Image (cartoon, rainbow, N blue to C red):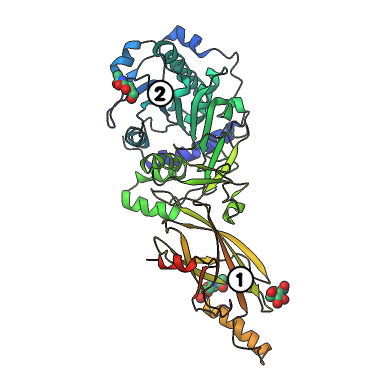
Amino acid sequence: MESPPCVSIFLVLCIFIQSSAHGQSLGLEPFGRRLRAAETMEASQETKTRFLLFEEERDKGCQIQLNHPDTLQQCGFNSSLPLVMIIHGWTVDGLLESWIWQMVAALKSGLAQPVNVVLADWLTLAYHHYTVAVRNTRLVGQEVAALILWLEESAQFSRSNVHLIGYSLGAHVSGFAGNYIGGKHKIGRITGLDAAGPLFEGSSPNDRLSPDDADFVDAIHTFTREHMGLSVGIKQPIAHYDFYPNGGYFQPGCHFLELYKHITKHGLTAITQTIKCSHERSVHLFIDSLLHPSLQSTAYQCGDMDSFSQGLCLSCKRGRRCNTLGYHARRGPQSRKSKRLFLATRAQSPFKVYHYQFKIQFINQLEKPVEPTFTMTLLGTKEENQKITITLDEEIASNKTYSFLITLDLDIGELVMIKFKWENGSVWTNVWNTVQTIIPWSRGPLYSGLVVNTIKVKAGETQQRMAFCSENMDGQQLPQTQEKTFVRCDINSQKLKRKIR
Ligand SMILES: *[C@@H]1O[C@H](CO)[C@@H](O)[C@H](O)[C@H]1NC(C)=O
Ligand SMILES: *[C@@H]1O[C@H](CO)[C@@H](O)[C@H](O)[C@H]1NC(C)=O
Ligand SMILES: *[C@@H]1O[C@H](CO)[C@@H](O)[C@H](O)[C@H]1NC(C)=O
């Protein structure tokens, strides 16, 4: 059955309406006595979750059954390899989503070291009202834990070799699995991909994914924009490393206008896809990290997106304040405190961008504040970047240093030269004419009255710091609509300049 659009809209509305109607209490009552996972499973022998092992990139999966060692052999489980388990989220149509197969393929093809890839299929428990599915996450977590404990007993498999990757509700399933296993030895790693927000936001660490649930927990937050006080993805940090691409609220390429184009092109069935766009972006960022080993995205520890947008957080401090987004994220020193990391991304794969902090000191010799728009062309040893237009959101009133973040899709190599130009000619002329009228005797040669001192640049990806000075010795006056060239202040700048293609 094709899913009609109302189902997809229901997807979003259901989360909001259901959860706001029932409030925070539903589904999160304490679980009562915390049973050892293995104990509970003993009785039933069968799990409601289906565990499917994938041998090839494109097979349909072979079911591993708890307490049936023969299924391990039949399915080709190799206990000397790590286990990566994919755990999906809530479903409105009862079907497995297409990203699952993309993730399986990426794990099978994108890693130098092969791994056992298993899908925890809990569709029968996820295909319910959101609140019911939420309640079921604990049971699924128990079943995942039971499987891991059984693998330890029967296949000499170590839990430290387990990596759970959970999307949306699946992220909390992973957390519960880690929690049920408990004890001193935890499972190796949990990755939470835009962990579900409603009914989990603000709850205690035992009631959601938390850093206690594995030796290493990383989370990617991609859709935390609020509607009626709720967000689809959880906002609060829930891991050792919490990544907030583009601030985590919403993702580029997911805006309504773009969705609209997508729908006109692909028909109404595209609606489901587009509504989930930002939520599911977490998954695609992760897949991207597997498919493009040479284009790993760096994320930077920062207090909030505002500071990040000013380019203030690009210092890695020898790796202590940076990490890699996705599969290749590095474990840091053990700390229970979550680190929040930010990065910008492109709208499509490959998602990587190159981050730069620009610090420009303006000196305004006019009496009026100005609101300039300028463009910069960045020339590097590898590439020349197209013009970037920058509009400062503050007017330049006097002498002030402005700091902002610039991101480039391309690796331009080492930055060598900046071509700088004021754009808004007409506005600018008006300002100048006004000055001319007020001070008709004019001091010295005509100049714009706005001066740029040095331009300081910090490249996030290479951690290189650079200073740029005006190329000519005619001072730093900035004539309007005329391009001005800045080169590296250091002596090697001539050598570098020759490297420009
Ligand atoms: C299991 O994996 C190891 C390491 O890659 C390999 O040497 C071994 O042959 C594999 N075993 C089987 C049964 O495939
Ligand atoms: C800005 O700097 C210039 C040159 O350094 C100086 O002449 C001018 O008085 C300064 N203006 C303000 C408002 O500080
Ligand atoms: C730049 O000029 C355009 C029209 O030429 C105008 O709409 C815009 O507001 C100007 N921007 C600034 C920052 O002055």
- For label 2, the residue is 124
In front: 426, or 5?
A: 426
Which is closer to the viewer, label 1 or label 2? 1
Which image quadrant shows ligand 1? top left
Figure check: 466 above or below 34: below
Q: Residues within 10 Å of mark 2 (few under 14, many from 20)?
A: some
Q: Residues within 10 Å of mark 1 (few under 14, many from 20)?
A: some
Quadrant location of the N terminus in the rendered image: top left
In front: 204, or 240?
A: 240
- Identify the residue at image location x=35%, y=11%: 69
Q: Tell me the quarter of the picture where residue 179 sits.
A: top right
Side (left or right) of 162 relative to 116:
right
Side (left or right) of 380 relative to 320:
left
Where disc 1 sits, the SS reads: strand
Where disc 2 sits, the SS reads: helix
Figure check: 263 above or below 34: below
Which residue is at the far top? 43
> Which amino acid, mark 1?
Asn
User: How far across and how far down the image is residue 159, in percent?
Assistant: 47, 20
User: How far across and how far down the image is residue 449, in percent?
Assistant: 62, 80
> Which amino acid, mark 2?
Thr
User: How far across and how far down the image is residue 51, in percent?
Assistant: 37, 21
- For label 1, the residue is 453
| Residue 424 visible here | yes
Q: Tell me the quarter of the picture where residue 450 sits.
A: bottom right
**Disc 1 to disc 2, C-alpha distance:** 65 Å
Side (left or right) of 106 relative to 303:
left
- Identify the residue at image location x=57%, y=17%: 183
